[in-house]
Image: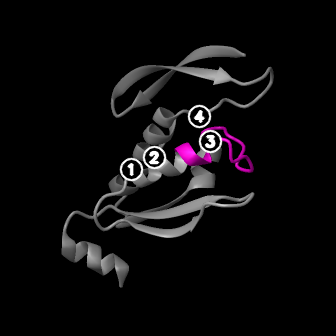
C-alpha cells in the first residue's frame, strides 16, 4: 500500500489531504471526509449558480472522487454521508441498497424559504 499527500482548496481554506492507494496502479480509496467535502462543494456550486435544488446520485459522487462506480466497496460510507447531510425538505428519490448496483439518489433543496421549497416541488 502506498500513500501520497496532496493539497485541496475547500471554501477558501487549503487543507492537506492524505490519499491511500490500495494496490500499485490502483484507484484512490475515498474516505468519509472526501465524500462530505465533495458533496459540500456540489451543493455550494449549485446554490451559487441559482439552482433551487440539486440531485446527487451516490455512484456519480463516488466516481467523481476517483472511485470505481461499479464497486460497492465504499457505497455504505457514501450513502451514509449523503443521508447525514440531508436537511428538512430534502428527498430520497431512489434507494436501492442491495445488489450489484447499490445506489441512492437524493434531491437536496437549496432554497431557504418554505415558499421557495414548495415551488421547486410543483
The residue positioned farthest toward the right in the image shown: 25
- Residue receiving disc 2: 81
* Residue indicated by mark 3: 74
First-in-chain label (3 vs 4):
4
> Which residue ends up furthest to the bottom in the rendered image?
122
Determine which residue is flagged by label 4. Answer: 30
Mark closest to the chain's N terminus, 3 or 2? 3
Residue drawn 70% across the image and 14% down it: 2
Q: Secondary structure at mark 2?
A: helix
Residue placed most toward the observer, 112 or 74: 74
**70 shown above or below 21:** below
CA–CA distance in space, label 3 to label 1:
16 Å
Which segment did they paint magenta? Answer: 65-77
Q: How is the image coloured?
A: one colour
How far across and how far down the image is residue 21, in percent?
Answer: 69, 23
For the residues labelled 3 and 4, the Cα–Cα distance comes to 8 Å
Task: Return the disc, 3 or 1, that comes first in the chain's sequence.
Answer: 3
Residue 103 image offset from top left, x and y in percent: 62, 59
The mark found on residue 84 in the picture is 1
Q: Residues within 10 Å of mark 4 (few under 14, many from 20)?
A: many
- Which quadrant of the figure contains the C terminus? bottom left
In the rendered view, tell whether residue 90 sits above or below residue 19.
below
Amino acid at each position: 500500500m502506498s500513500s501520497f499527500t496532496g493539497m485541496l482548496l475547500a471554501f477558501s481554506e487549503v487543507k492537506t489531504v492524505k490519499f491511500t492507494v490500495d494496490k500499485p496502479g490502483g484507484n484512490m480509496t475515498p474516505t468519509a471526509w472526501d465524500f462530505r467535502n465533495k458533496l459540500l462543494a456540489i451543493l455550494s456550486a449549485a446554490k451559487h449558480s441559482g439552482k433551487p435544488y440539486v440531485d446527487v446520485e451516490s455512484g456519480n459522487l463516488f466516481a467523481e472522487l476517483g472511485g470505481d462506480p461499479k464497486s460497492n466497496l465504499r457505497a455504505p460510507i457514501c450513502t451514509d454521508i449523503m443521508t447525514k447531510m440531508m436537511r428538512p425538505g430534502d428527498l430520497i428519490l431512489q434507494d436501492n441498497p442491495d445488489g450489484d448496483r447499490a445506489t441512492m439518489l437524493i434531491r437536496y433543496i437549496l432554497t431557504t424559504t418554505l415558499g421557495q421549497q414548495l415551488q421547486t416541488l410543483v
